[in-house]
Image (spheres, rainbow, N blue to C red):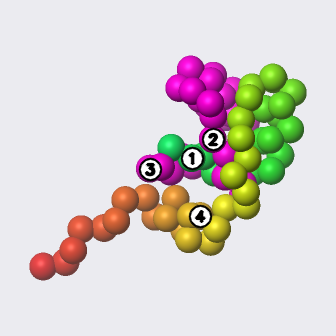
Amino acid sequence: MVTITFPDRDTEKKALGFLLGRFSGRVLASGEHLVPEAALEALADQNIPFTVKGKATYEQQLAALRGAAPAPVQ
């Protein structure tokens, strides 16, 4: 998985519309997106601009899978 960002909200919406159903991925609370490496080529082929931040860390991938922090047990 790779962490990417988009230059603006309109581009992000266009990219998500394209990626939906083609690739799995996650949107982090920071606004960054975790996508498989194959999605990068597909986005480039569609002329959708994005910035690669780097390989997703284990912690980012784990947080994306878990979602929001669970409520404390009382």
Q: Position of residue 50 (x, y in %)?
A: 71, 35
Q: CA distance from mark 2 to mark 1?
A: 5 Å
Q: Which residue is mark 4?
A: 61
Q: Please indicate whether residue 44 sits to the left or right of residue 52 in the image.
A: right
Q: Which mark is residue 32?
A: 1
Indicate the amino acid at tag 2: Thr
Indicate the amino acid at tag 1: Glu
Q: Kindly check if marks 4 and 1 are in contact, taking CB atoms under 8 A apart as contact.
A: no
Q: Which residue is mark 3?
A: 29
Q: Kindly check if marks 2 and 3 are in contact, taking CB atoms under 8 A apart as contact.
A: no
Q: CA distance from mark 4 to mark 3?
A: 13 Å
Q: Which mark is residue 5?
A: 2
- Any magenta on residue 12? yes
Residue 72 to residue 12: above or below: below
Residue 41 to residue 30: above or below: above
- Element class at badge 1: loop
Earlier in the chain: of badge 2 and badge 3, it is: 2
